[in-house]
Image: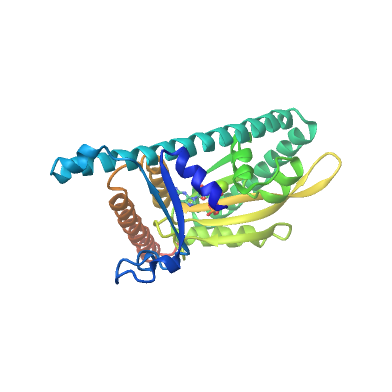
Amino acid sequence: MTSREVKQIAYSLGAELCGIAGLDRFSGAPEGYHPRDVWPGCQSVISFACRFPAATAACGSAAAYTRVRNSITLFGYKKHLEQTVEEQAETLKEQKRIIQMQAEQLKTTEAFNRLMVEYRAAIMEMETRLQVLNADFSHAYNRNPFESIKSRLKSLTSIYEKLGRRGIPLTVESIRENLTDVAGLRVICSFPDDIYRLAELITTQDDILLLRKKDYIQNPKPNGYRSLHLILAVPIYLSNEKKHMKVEVQFRTIAMDFWASLEHKLKYKRDVDNADSIVRQLKTCADSIELLDLQMQAIRDQIDHSRSPV
Ligand code: GTP
Ligand code: MG
């Protein structure tokens, strides 16, 4: 940015004088008043001035001066903020309009509809495999390792928002390449160790590939979020071909799911004064839930060990 542009901005915001000085002009400044004392990286100083009514200085009270100064500076600042916000809103509106147009076009393409059929098939395939494991485990140990499975196909709106955030174009190829959670399953287990048992059983199936594992149970997120996330590639058999599709599977206990569901709802209501305290309280709840999970698991172990063999 040139000094002319800087001055233009100052004038457009209401300044009546504006000048830019090099640091050498401040060589004699007393300690604490040198520009580098205020901002160590300072290279030059922009000064601008606005006219004060003469009476402000003559009235003998600092109050009048302070009021005028505040209204001059705040007025300029407010004007600047309004301009910036307006410009950003316009740009965002335009970007959204373009993306929406692309999304509308994409929705009607054969390739996109076909891709969604493939992701739906991947969800069905994955869910069946997990249900089979549940039935087999239940037969062998007389209890189910998971309580329920939820699944969802990511909506087109979420797909374009996610790609848009990363600055990736909205095409069938980029969805396939860049997104790993178009097909998503959530497996709600009874106990933490069931999560690892199920994850082990599913990842060792010889036609399933483990692409990525995020263990937020061993390493919870700083806010207290806990779950095991696996990105898997699962084979699907279509009428004319076989292909591997990416699927995100989240494993949680009932207690972890309870926390995550409520935290997710509260996330959108954080525009409050005591946001820090709320974050801390949610973390405390997450810690209590972790303890609860381990206690319930210990109770289950006691019951299992005290059962007389049949
Ligand atoms: P996304 O862009 O949201 O998919 O994040 P990511 O690609 O970094 O993946 P990550 O595995 O961290 O999170 C994926 C999903 O896990 C999210 O879409 C949520 O469903 C869930 N999740 C992750 N972090 C949190 C959290 O702090 N709170 C809650 N409630 N859910 C979370
Ligand atoms: Mg996601």
Q: Visible in this render: residue 172?
A: yes
Q: Residue at x 39, y 56 (%)?
A: 223
Placement of 27 over or under 76, stated as above or below: below
On the picture, is 264 further left or further right than 58?
right
Which coloring applies here? rainbow
**Which of 306 and 129 lies nearest the eye of the viewer?**
129
Can residue 148 be seen here? The reply is no
Q: Position of residue 101 (x, y in %)?
A: 68, 29
141 or 112, which is in the foreground? Answer: 112
* Residue lying at the far left of the rendered structure: 60
Quadrant where the C terminus sits is: bottom left
Viewer-side residue, 155 vs 240: 155
Q: Is residue 223 left or right of residue 175?
A: left
User: Horizontal and vertical percent for residue 296?
Assistant: 35, 58
The residue positioned farthest toward the right in the image shown: 240
Please report the residue visible at 50 percent of the width from the left and 50 percent of the height from the top.
146
Residue drawn 67% across the image and 59% down it: 211
Marks counted in the figure total: 0
Snapshot quadrant of residue 76: top left
Q: Percent position (x, y) of residue 131?
A: 59, 47
Residue 14: x and y, percent?
Answer: 41, 38
